[in-house]
Structure formats: C-alpha cells, structure tokens
Image (cartoon, grey):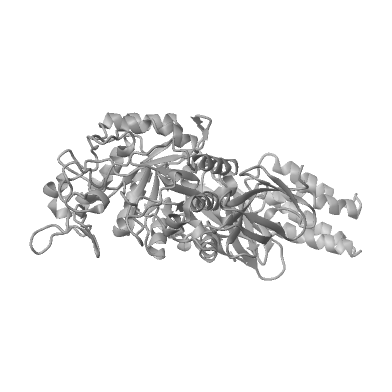
C-alpha cells in the first residue's frame, strides 16, 4: 500500500530512537512532528504512547494507594500549528519504559468537508458532493471492528446528508462535532504512515521536579571530641523539610581509610584525630556496604531513612566507585585496580592534583564481570535499605557501557530509582550520560553568572534538542565549589543565585552552610572552602540571626505552587530587558493558565533600573489590555499596560521580582 504521508522530525526522540527520551509522571509531555503529503488534501495526525513490550510499569498512586488497573496505551490527536508542524500533548500515567509512535494519513472526510463548505459558500450546486459524502460514510459501515455505537452513528450521519433536507442544514450536519468524531473514530488506520516506535522512559515526579539539600551527617551534633551520628543528624530533618526540600543527600557514609588520610584543608599527613575525606572509602570495618562506626550502625541508618520519610524527605546516597588503600577489596580483588611497574597500585590523580587516599577501579580488568557484579550488589544493598535516589560521583570517569548496563539492570526491578550524574565535564560527555539513562545531571550553572552567559545557557537547556533527554539540576554551591561570585558578592549574591537556581530550573540543590552565607575560600583564586567539611567536622549554629532559611522556604513554596510551570524546561523563554545587569525570563504551564515572569538583578552590589518588553503571547495575555502582575516574594500587585514596563531592584533588599501574571487590572 502506498504511503502518501511523510512523518519526520518526531519529538521527543533521541538519536532516532537509539536512546529513550525522558518524561515525568503527571507532567504534560509535548509530542510534535513534521507531517505532510503531496497536493492539498487535509491530513489526520495522532500519536500513541504504549507500554514497552514486557515492561514492568509502576502505576500512578492515588492518595496512598496504587491503582490496580494496569496502564494501557494513550492516544492523542495532533494539531497543525503551521508550516506542516503538528503538536499534541499527553500526561504519562505510569513509571517505566514506554514506546511512542506518530502517525499521519490523508483525511478523506476532512478534505471532502472542507471542499463542500467552500463550494456551498460560493453558491455552487453541491448535490453530487453530498452523494460522495454518503459513499464515504457508507464505506465506514462496512469496516470490521466497529464498536457497538458506531453503526447507529454512521446511519444517522448518512441520513442527515440525504436530499430530504436543505443544503445549508446538510452542510451543518456534516461539519458537526458528532459527525467529525465518528468519521475520525472509524478511520482505517492501516492507511497511515507511522514513525517509530521511539522509546520513552517515564520517571516519577522526583525525577523531573526536585529540590536537594546536601549535608555531612558527621557534622550535625558533632563536638570537639566526637562525630555527629545518624541520630543527631535526624534532629535536623524537620528544619530541612520545613524549608521545602524533597531530598536530603549524604556524601559517602562508609568507613574511611587511614592510609594517606587527608587532614584539614586537604593537607597530607593527617593527625590521629583527623576524620579524613568520606570519599576515601573502606577500612577494616568494610567498604561500600558498610557504615562508618562513628555514624552508628546499619540499623541506625534504617532509622534515619524512616525519620526522613516521616518528615517528607527522601534520602539520597553518594554512589562513589573508588576505594581507599585499606578497603577489603584491595587485598581480596587486586585485579580490580591498576598496578604500576613497581607493583604498587595507582592512586587517583587529576594532574597536578593527587589523591593518594583513593584507588580508582580498573574497568579494563580481565575480571570485569566480577567487578560489575560487585558494584551492582552495592546499589542493590542500599535499595534494600530504603534508598531510591543516588548521586553518582564522577560518572564521566567510568565507561559508558557500564552505566548503561547498571541503570537498565536496576530499573528492571526498581523503575522508581533516580540517578543524579555529578559530571562537571565536557558537554558531549554530559549529554551521553543523560542519553544512556541518568535521570538528572549537575550543570555549568555555578559558572554562569553574567547576563550573556545565563541567557545562552538557559536557551540551550530549554530550546535545544537536549530538552528531550537532559534534565539539568542547578546547584548554587557544593562542598567543592564556592564560586568567586559568592565569595565577593555577599548575602545579595546568595539571594539572587537562590532565585535563579530554584525558579529557572526544574531541579535545584544547595550544600548546607549556604543559608548561613558561608563564603570564605581557602586562598585567593580558589573555589575550595576554608576549613572544608570534606576533611573535618564543621558543626553550625542554625539559629544564627542572619539566615537565608526564610527566603529559601518562600522560594520553594513558589516552586510547589507553580509546579508544572517550573518543571517544564521547554516552556522557559527569555524576554528583552534593556540592562546588561538584568535578566528577565518566564516560566509557564502547558496551557498558559499558570505563568510566572522572573526579573533578576544580577549585580549584587548596586541598585539597577531597567525597562522590560515582555512577549505577551508567551505570558498568555492581550498586550492591548491591562494585565496584573503580583510579586510572589512580597505580594505587591501592579497593573501593566502597553508593551513595556519599568522595574527597579535593590539587591540589599530583594534581588528579584517573581511576578504571577493575570489578565485584568490589579484588585
């Protein structure tokens, strides 16, 4: 059978279906394609999202109970939006692997109806056209597989086209919603051109919309003589949850090696009392499936996970694939490491930096199967203890094929598991990690501070092809990264970066101490913290008077009130503002029923004034009519009229406006 219709440039898709695109449970997934044929006939286009063959899907939860009905295929009609480009939208209903197909076909009834209307409106005799219409309808009656309601609906449509009624009435009946619905419902889809299937992976909501808080449990409740524990850090959980975070992320909680242990500020030659870096994993007590005795026992960890759940938080663990020289695997499986000509094991290096307290794995080992199995068992162990979120340390230094195998294997039994890639590396490498399955990724946000840098990067992340598979996570700081902007900008810099990270991105994160404006580097020109918590205990006074926690709470509340608008990166748009120190962008829901307009003063030192020219079509308002904007940070309301508006921002008071947009004047 000749396929007259061309279907191409289907989205979401990744490398022609070689990898799975990403979608999020409960969030609209936009589907688009270029669909066309020769000639001038009308077309039909639709998309089908069906469970992948043999897939184990996790149904959406209703309240606290999962639906019992297994998910089935979803179909959505696509609409022509111009230049042969068709768009539709559906909302995924279950977590796991799906397949997307997009189809197009010549619409015989739609073409007939269009031409009938044109001829009738021109005053032509259309009796022969009505005969042709009845033939089309009657041909549908002979199709196999009609539903019980279809024959009667088709009979009624055929009768409405008979000469017993006037031409105008018959044209009206032919174009009624009921007539169009039955003719589309009974269309022979075997005549369609279908592109796909394209794989789509649907994550739970936390995969596409999340706020992360990183802390070192050993610092919470610590004294000069002793480390904090899972019990003492548990007392911090309600405050973290109250700020609106979803995930509490812990660096490695395993035994720490003694050999070449690092001292304060990354010095060598640690004293007996120095606690060392948690990333130097392993000692006589065990390795990646053991708990540092200073923190407690595995039962204490289970209690911490339970306490986090009661607070409404999920626990994320660091999945770091490396060993200290004291790790049991060094003696038990020496073949898993790289040996130098003198017989010693090569430690980690990033010249000129040297990490003598860490041995990386050798993925070229002849015992690759044994190494892979052991590393998989590590993840399964922690899944067994209630962990469903993993922050993966330096995945770009391990083989792509390992990660693809590991993620696919874990997801077969646990599709709800989330993987965050800590890969500050080259763009193509970061993109490849996202393609092979990582749920989210750290980004270059920390180093994007000027208007030009932020504009280019936000456009790339929201409008480029990576939006189909690369989910950014904007971190304002990490234990390794204290950017000069924060060192030099003081509290205003912390506030404006908070607003940008949390409201310009679907997911964001911060390392504890940010709310206390910690900004002292170990030396000028360094991004390392002075007295870094990576190497020593750092208890904090969370009751300090000057604290960013109230603003963090407010901003996370804004995120939750506008969940869909913030979660959909593809709807982010930049708007013109006539100052190099101001950035203006909008976030909106799929249907433009929820729109935010964000204006940020990027200069932490000076008051800035500017005029903005918002794209009113993106805001979903008529620019010729007054419309209201309400600042979500302080509830101040303004009525704007015309193409431009004036803004003034003092970074010492507030670094940004977060406007909720409504049509109509302020009330």
Identity of the residue furthest to the bottom in this view: 38
The quadrant the C terminus occupies is top right
In the foreground, 407 or 324: 324
In screen coordinates, is 204 left or right of 338?
A: right
In screen coordinates, is 497 left or right of 225?
A: right
Q: Position of residue 591 (x, y in %)?
A: 66, 49
Asked if residue 430 shows in the view, the reply is yes
In screen coordinates, is 563 left or right of 399?
A: right
Asked if residue 443 shows in the view, the reply is no
Q: Position of residue 110 (x, y in %)?
A: 74, 58
Residue at 16% x, 47% y is 329
Q: Position of residue 160 (x, y in %)?
A: 84, 48
Residue at 52% x, 39% y is 550
The correct choice, above or below, for 142 with respect to 224 in the image is below
Q: Position of residue 47 (x, y in %)?
A: 59, 53
Residue at 82% x, 57% y is 131
Count up the numbered dots: 0
Identity of the residue furthest to the left in this view: 342
In the foreground, 615 or 495: 495
The correct choice, above or below, for 23 with respect to 612 in the image is above
The quadrant the N terminus occupies is bottom right
């Amino acid at each position: 059978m000749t396929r007259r219709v061309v279907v191409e440039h289907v989205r979401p898709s990744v490398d022609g279906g070689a990898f799975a695109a990403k979608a999020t449970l409960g969030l609209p997934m936009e589907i688009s394609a270029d669909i066309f044929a020769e000639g001038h006939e009308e077309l039909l286009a639709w998309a089908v999202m069906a469970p992948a063959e043999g897939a184990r899907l996790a149904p959406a939860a209703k309240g606290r109970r999962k639906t019992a009905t297994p998910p089935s295929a979803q179909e959505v009609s696509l609409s022509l939006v111009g230049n042969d480009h068709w768009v539709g939208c559906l909302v995924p209903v279950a977590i796991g692997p799906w397949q997307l197909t997009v189809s197009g076909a010549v619409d015989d009834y739609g073409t007939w109806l269009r031409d009938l209307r044109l001829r009738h409106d021109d005053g032509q005799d259309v009796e022969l056209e009505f005969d042709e219409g009845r033939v089309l309808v009657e041909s549908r009656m002979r199709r196999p597989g009609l539903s019980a309601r279809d024959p009667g609906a088709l009979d009624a449509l055929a009768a409405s086209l008979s000469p017993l009624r006037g031409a105008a009435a018959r044209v009206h009946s032919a174009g009624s919603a009921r007539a169009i619905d039955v003719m589309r419902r009974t269309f022979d889809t075997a005549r369609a051109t279908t592109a796909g299937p394209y794989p789509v992976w649907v994550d739970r909501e936390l995969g596409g919309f999340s706020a992360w808080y990183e802390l070192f449990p050993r610092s919470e409740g610590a004294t000069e003589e002793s480390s904090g524990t899972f019990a003492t850090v548990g007392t911090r959980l309600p405050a973290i949850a109250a700020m609106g975070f979803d995930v509490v992320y812990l660096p490695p909680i395993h035994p720490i090696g003694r050999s070449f242990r690092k001292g304060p500020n990354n010095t060598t030659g640690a004293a007996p009392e120095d606690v060392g870096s948690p990333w130097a994993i392993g000692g006589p007590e065990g390795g990646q499936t053991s708990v540092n005795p200073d923190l407690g026992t595995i039962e204490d960890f289970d209690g911490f996970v339970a306490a986090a759940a009661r607070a409404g938080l999920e626990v994320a663990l660091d999945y770091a694939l490396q060993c200290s020289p004291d790790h049991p695997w060094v003696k038990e499986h020496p073949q898993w490491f790289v040996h130098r000509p003198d017989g010693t094991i090569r430690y980690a290096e990033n010249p000129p930096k040297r990490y003598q307290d860490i041995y990386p794995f050798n993925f070229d080992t002849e015992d690759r199967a044994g190494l892979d199995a052991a590393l998989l068992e590590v993840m399964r162990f922690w899944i067994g203890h209630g962990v469903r979120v993993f922050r993966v340390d330096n995945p770009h230094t391990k083989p792509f094929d390992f990660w693809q195998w590991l993620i696919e294997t874990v997801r077969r039994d646990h599709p709800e598991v989330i993987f965050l890639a800590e890969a500050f590396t080259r763009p193509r490498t970061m993109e490849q990690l996202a393609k092979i399955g990582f749920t989210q990724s750290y980004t270059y946000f920390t180093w994007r501070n000027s208007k030009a840098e932020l504009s280019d990067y936000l456009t790339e992340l929201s409008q480029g092809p990576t939006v189909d598979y690369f989910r950014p996570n904007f971190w304002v700081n990490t234990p390794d990264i204290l950017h000069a902007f924060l060192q030099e900008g003081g509290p205003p810099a912390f506030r404006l970066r908070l607003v940008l990270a949390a409201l310009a991105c679907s997911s964001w994160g911060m390392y504890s101490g940010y709310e206390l404006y910690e900004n002292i580097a170990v030396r000028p020109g360094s991004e390392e913290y002075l007295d870094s918590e990576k190497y020593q205990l750092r208890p904090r006074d969370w009751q300090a008077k000057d604290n960013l926690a109230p603003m963090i709470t407010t901003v996370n509340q804004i995120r939750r009130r506008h969940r869909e608008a913030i979660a959909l990166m593809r709807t982010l748009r930049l708007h013109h503002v006539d100052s190099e120190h101001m950035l203006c962008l909008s976030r909106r829901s799929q249907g433009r029923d929820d729109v935010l307009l964000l204006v940020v003063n990027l200069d932490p030192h000076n008051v800035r004034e500017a005029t903005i020219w918002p794209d009113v079509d993106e805001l979903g308002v008529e620019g010729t009519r007054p419309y209201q904007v309400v600042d979500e940070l302080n509830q101040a309301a303004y009525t704007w009229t015309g193409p431009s508006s004036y803004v003034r921002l003092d970074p010492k008071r507030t670094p940004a406006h977060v406007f909720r947009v409504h049509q109509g004047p302020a009330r």
